[in-house]
Image: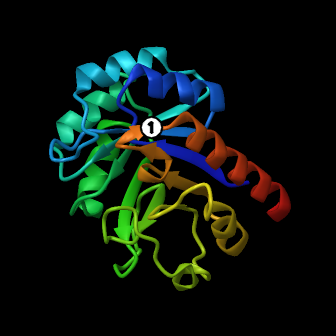
Amino acid sequence: MTKIKFCGLKSLDDIYYANELLPEYVGFVFVPKSKRYITPAQAEKLRAALSEKICAVGVFVNENLANVAELLNAGIIDAAQLHGNEDDDYIKILRGLSNKPIIKAFQIHSSLQSSADFILIDSGAGGGKVFDWNLIKNLRREYFLAGGLNPENVGDAIKILNPFAVDVSSGIETDGKKDFDKMAAFAKAVRGSRELVN
């Protein structure tokens, strides 16, 4: 049953939307260069308002290990999603600092080998671009599918790939802000499609 991750939540309104729609995951971006960046203090406030039914994932790029572990161990996030050059040595050290799940992100043309709990596969093109899903049709491990997903195409993605989870950010935004109607349409498309697959 494909799970849902709404990524890049920045405001209490975003949290209220998520609480109503109950995706399995939400993402907080701790990457200063990102337009969706939030500070640990902001994330703590958002997490306090987030439903306990939803897993909060912190998104990082080559972050200091101690900073990632601190957010995990403080309960501000439940899992770490790594988008930089973090290798298995980095993951091994992080596991020694925290027992929380780790998601390692890869671009579609990279080697998808990792000791992380899950991998996330993206186009690597930025700006929410879709890649050729047939390239991973035979992948035999659980993964998060990202890259250009929206309410219109996510149902097809699930029917073709049946991924562990689908990850969306720009596809549920209007003018750079999370749009409840798009979030609701995305959730409905995923839940309707996964009933057909499973």
Vertical placement of residue 98 versus 144, above or below: above
Nearer to me, 16 or 166 = 16
**Left or right of residue 162: residue 38:** left
Nearer to me, 69 or 163 = 163
Viewport quadrant of the C terminus: bottom right
* Quarter of the rendering containing residue 162: bottom right
Give x and y (percent) for residue 13.
Answer: 46, 22
**Label 1 environment density (alpha carbons within 10 Å; few <14, some 14–19, many ≥20):** many
**Residue at 36% across / 68% down in the picture?**
106
**Residue at 61% across / 82% down in the picture?**
138
**Residue at 63% across / 32% down in the picture?**
22
Give x and y (percent) for residue 118.
Answer: 49, 57
**Left or right of residue 164: residue 13:** left
Q: Which residue is mark 1?
A: 178
Viewport quadrant of the N terminus: bottom right
Instruction: Determine the residue located farthest toward the front in the rendered image.
Output: 175
* Quarter of the rendering containing residue 196: bottom right
Residue 99, can we see it? Answer: no
Circle 1 sits in a helix, a strand or a loop, which is it?
strand
Give x and y (percent) for residue 5.
Answer: 53, 45
Residue 18, can we see it? Answer: yes
Nearer to me, 93 or 83 = 83
Give, as a three-letter code, the residue at label 1. Lys
| Protein image colouring | rainbow
Give x and y (percent) for residue 46.
Answer: 39, 20
